[in-house]
Image (cartoon, helix red, strand yellow):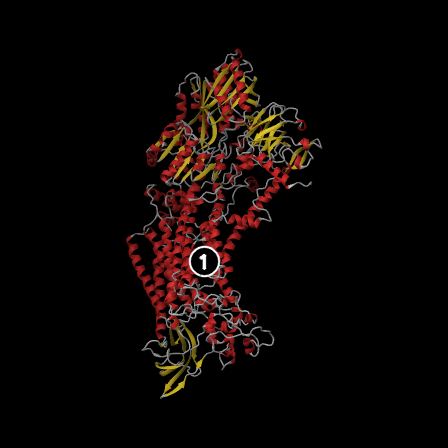
Amino acid sequence: MTWKSPVALVREALQGQRAREKDLRSLMSNLPYEGLEKGKQPNRYFPSNAIKTTKYSLLLFIPMNLYEQFHRLANIYFVGLAILNFIPVVNAFQPEVALIPICIILSLTALKDAWEDFRRYQSDKKLNNTPCFIYSRKEKQFVERRWKDVRVGDFVKVVCNETIPADLLLLYTSDPNGVCLIETANLDGETNLKQRTAVSGVCNSFEPESFNGIVVCEKPNNNLNHFKCYEKPDNQKVGAGIESLLLRGCTVRNTDHAVGFVVYAHETKSMLNNSGPRYKRSKLERRLNIDVFFCFILLFAMCLIGALHFIWLYALPGVPPYLVPPANGHLDSPNLSSFYMFFTMIILLQILIPISLYVSIELVKIGQIFLITNDIDLYDEETDSRIQCKALNITEDLGQIEYIFSDKTGTLTENKMVFRRCSIMGTEYPHKENIRLAVLNEPESEEEVIYNQDLQPLPTGWSLESEEANSEDTHRHGSRRKSKVLGTTQSDVAFSSPLETEVIPDRKLLQQISRTGSSSRCQKIDPYLEFFLALTICNTVVVSMATTQRRRPLTSDNLRYEAESPDEAALVYATKAYGFTLLARTPDSVTVRLPSGEVLVFEVLDTLTFDSNRKRMSVLVRHPITKEYVLYTKGADYAIMELLGTPYAQRHLDCYAKEGLRTLCIAKKVVSEAVYKHWLVERQRALTAIDNREVLIMDTAVQLETNLTLLATGIEDRLQENVPDTIMALRQAGIKVWVLTGDKPETAVNIGYACRLLEDEDLVLVIDGRTLTMALSPDLRGDFVDLAKHCRSVLCCRVTPLQKSRVVKVIREKLKVMTLAVDGANDVNMIQAADIGIGISGQEGMQAVMASDFAISRFKHLKKLLLVHGHWCYTRLANMIIYFFYKNVQAYVNLLFWYQFFCGFSGSTMIDYWLLIFFNLFFTSLPPIMFGIMDRDISAEMLLGVPELYKTGQGEGDYRFTTFWVSILDAFYQSLVCFFIPYFVYQDSDIDMFTFGTPLNTTALFTILLHLSIEIKSWTVVHWVVMLGSVLFYFIVTLAYSATCVTCNPPSNPYWVLQNQMADPMFYLICILSTVVALLPYTFHVLRNSIALSPLIEAKHLDRLDPSMREEWMKEWRSYRGGGQVQRSTLS
Amino acid sequence: MLLKLGGHCSFQDFSEESCHGPGSDEMVQEENEFTNRPDNTAFTQQRLPAWQPILSAGIVIPGFVLIGLAFIGVGVALFVTSRSIQVLERDYTGDESGTPCASCANSNVQNSFGFCFPQSQGPVFFYYGLSNYFQNYRRYGTSKDDNQLYGVLKYFTSPSDNCAPYAYNSNNQPIVPCGSIANSMFNDTFKLYQTVNGTRQEVSLDGKGIAWWTDYNIKYRNPTNNPLKDAFNGSNSGLFYRNFLINPIYWSKPAYELDTSDPSNNGFVNQDFLVWMRRAALPDFRKLYRRISQDKYPDGLPAGNYSLEITYNYRVYRFSGKKKVVFSNVSWMGGKNEFLGIAYLVVGSMCVFMSIVMLIVYAKFKFPDEE
């Protein structure tokens, strides 16, 4: 290395900074500079591909971790107190002893962080050393390197089924059409293949060394579906977007190999999307903080009382021998020593602010999340996925939900589409055969309405089954299997049907086609033919060969359709049933086989892709026979209707919608060559623009999509399994379920009935997007919320994602309720607006899942997640927190406080310091944590069987303002008992300090543990071990400590104290009496609950019966309670 | 996320098999296929067998009755025992008239007063008592050096900082034993006389074993120097003392001369010193002074007139304290204490009473399990 002046280094650093911050980056090939030192590299400012997700380095771990931990106020508070203890005039303990708790807590957290960081380090190392191919000029070929060696400006070759190491601009593929297929499952969970095209102008005969252009791209961002750049080979700009970008983490499929230019290394889109777990504050925690504040007030008051020291000092007639002056030999003035005493008291009573509470809550939540993610009922076999908890600290909020906002598509429904009906030129083709097929699959649906018949299909994986199946025999009658669904009332038998891929043609329509098919030679444009051609062409379905190992249904031709959205696949399969087979699709052409066997190759001039604003997509092709420019458009009915040149009767569409079908309209337009040419120029300009490109592209799309001619079709989206059952249960649990959907009102209402969201006697509000906008206006908002409050359910139709999130926000703010949003696709806004966002990982986009707090795979999982885990997590945590406050106030703080009245407010403790600290840290810390993780007030079966029990957690729930104060009062009472019974016994005797403290400490331990024992609702082995273990541990440690420590801990010295006490019968008599008297009122409090029998207690009684009896009781109880009359009650 | 299927393994096979009960092959396959499937154990599925007690009337009422009865029994035993203990207390502060030693505080050092003692039922313990004396005061309590008291010579010359300002005197001479507790040791002495036929007979008092055994044998130790004096006055030839050691400033005699009659009762292991060093928990306390020696009075102190001769050294007016002497015999429950017995009786009766009330209440609110 040559020596560089500091100035040069700084300049270099600044340049790098500037280069990275620029909105546009110009990148060059590294090849001409190969082998040169780093300073000469053109792309040296951009980070290399080696990733480092670790937070710490080995050397700096301790300071960095401490720095991080001291961001927590509680830690600073406790360190402050420990430091205060080093000041001789105010110290209460020996300084070193006071450091123990904070040190233990800091080191526990540090250990946890270190372990997590080490795991990150290991996975980084593995990833960084994955092999890949980079072009080397020296060797004139691609050579094997590691991922970490990839730099911006390199040329990287990826081969089939390999993971892409960095964000690559696709320049060349083995495919003659310059197409590369990638699977983005690792990134967003979507398993369909996405097509990427090589940047035009560079493809075909591509040699890395001859690449001499500059790639100008935007600054890295985390948007997975968006990228812009252009390339300047020789003064001419070639634009490229996301369709030419291979993203890091994706897998190459169906393409032998591809070569790309590295645009982003390290700052790749997938890396920027890695935001780690989110931290939300739960409602309970917000409440808790208020109570901690009260604790501060309490502490302050108690310390002030301690500072009354001076009154006591003034009352002394002289200087008694026990009043020891400081080392200088002169007594402080009473006022000054009172001032010091205030701080001494803070140190002494510091545990009133429960530091261990925060640590315990964290541990409890880790435990709760462990149990939730390990629940086998929340595991989905089809996708082999468990529930994912992304937000780590809002588990207890699950138990307090009052409003659920749900999307429809992909959430309530499978988002697996089946072609159902179509209407062409005003003629309806009902496809009755399809219905019959569906009925066949559903033995018990005879009396049901035709479109709602398969309410309980189980997706055991149509894709799995079709693996080995030929299309001829795919009418398999649902392979039965025992589902592990908990609910005993619902059907255990599930069906899987290959409905999606299979459409039986409508006889009448088939006749029409064969008639026109035979006459198609006459070149006359036939509407039927056009309809199917449009369906076949106007999509982005990719045809893939069966060679790759992927689970997709195969057609008889060994064709496999990879669609970005399930409705497209449904349509293509439908056309195939009618003989219009999509054979191949390249960026430039579509190959279609007609029923007659004729193969047509359409030249694709442009594809106007789908976006959520236009709600439609178009494909512009050149007809191979007529040579006309034809635009086929497909989209949501209302999105097409407004563009129609001729008005069209809505009749069929409305009728479809009423049947719960999702309607799509297909339209076409013939474009004259002149118009096309004109439009093409604008389009080109829009494509190369880097600012505002989306808007421009959309504008051009809109320009062309006018004056269309309509053809129509209907598709069905099936409900997911157990949706009606889940919704029923949620409603019984007192949760209001709102469905917010972009569908038409008719469709929405129909789905509402299908999933039993709507029932005849209900007051239901159905509101559409336009009305909603008005309803949400500031002056009407209040009325709207009032109205909605009285409705059992609300259906919002035709709403945009933004409106969805506004609805959630309004309800949340106006009603001050806990809200939960479920979404299966891309409504990130709504999910983030709610208190809890739940994503359903389904067929379409996974953005919702990425943004969610919990990700589940089926809607039905919501039932157990809320009713069981929500209830448990909430009651566990609420009870644990209350108990914690009680515990700290009772044992540690108040006993010491009362003693101050008998030791001249001097800050003395009657218990050895070490034992005092151990008491909180070891003897009584484990039971509440175990309680918070494992207690089970009511069995899961009971909670699922009687959803009304969920109501106990809603609103204020178990943890109320009064609960805190009642527990504090109880703690005060208990501490009075624990202190004054021994006090009166030992009054005026020859008892010494630690001997006096021993029964106090022991009684406190027993009271605390027995208090918890009354709280614990079910005793498992773990409970016994922990509780008895704590008692044993207390005695063993204390006995060992008092037996061994003669001079080890001066000046405090409890030598042989407990041994002496344990030989004295009085010790036991005092402990028994104090414990019993202390716990009496609490026992009565608990008993009161069993007089006025609360639903929870009643449920607990039922829980003890054997299962068959219990079921009968449950039924009886439900009918007796009328399903909704459960009062709220507390258990605390 | 992605389910990887290998070869010909198919879902169909699996599902058909599982209808008839899964074969072992399928089980293996299943494990391979569903890598994310959570373990189906009782612990992770929260199905551990559990005992679910419910506090219901059927348990609580009999429980209360039982507890109540047991408490009443214990209470009676305690109360009776406590009643049988005889206690005689005499205040000898001497700062107010009408007390046994009315002028003690103002007069000369030697005082005496007489009192009657009934026949005792067992060995009698002789205590001195102080009130309003905060031996539990924090700074006072830490003012000692455990290592010094353990007999480690190193700490004789450099006592712990805890002892300050009673670690060194103004001439920077180390104090042994250092600290405020030792310094403020109670130094009144008593002699008890029985008046038999007008003559005073000294009652022999036993000062052995009044401190904790562990204190005497383990916690406190004298240095091994022989004679003991060498260690305490600094004339130890084995060690070079830059400064001579001195007694605590309130002490009239050095530590090695606390008990001239018994050489083994000197230094740190002097019984009176040990009793004093064990700090009282509460501001009003008594400390064991002597036992009435059992050799001479095996059945306790006989009834009769006694007089107590007090060497009045300890001043208590600075903290408005009181001094007293207490004669008491002891039982298995220690000294006389009626509180505990009464408390047991009250709580026991309360439990019984409450169970009756509960019974009435439950009779009114019919209980589902009692239907």
> Residue A1048 appears at what percent x and percent y?
53, 65
Height in image: B251 above or below A269?
below
Question: Can the viewer see residue A1020?
Answer: no
Q: Is residue A955 left or right of residue A277?
A: left
> Residue A783 appears at what percent x and percent y?
32, 34
Return the residue found at the far top.
A522
Q: Quadrant of residue A637?
A: top left
Check the residue under mark 1 and report the chain it is in. Answer: A
Return the residue found at the far right.
A139
Q: Quadrant of residue A1?
A: top right
Residue that label 1 marks? A347
Q: How many marks?
A: 1
Height in image: A624 above or below B99?
above
> Residue A116 appears at what percent x and percent y?
55, 46
Question: Can the viewer see residue A365?
Answer: yes
Height in image: A308 above or below A733?
below
Task: Compare residues A345 and A121 and report the one nearer the observer.
Answer: A345
Helix or strand or loop: what does disc 1 sit on?
Answer: helix
Task: Compare residues A176 and B37 and report the one nearer the observer.
Answer: A176
The amino acid on which the numbered mark 1 sits, given as a three-letter code, is Ile
Mark 1 surroundings: few (<14), some (14-19) or many (≥20) residues within 10 A: many
Task: Compare residues A861 and A26 and report the one nearer the observer.
Answer: A26
Task: Compare residues A113 and B299 and report the one nearer the observer.
Answer: A113
> Residue B175 appears at what percent x and percent y?
51, 72
Q: Is residue B292 left or right of residue A55?
A: left
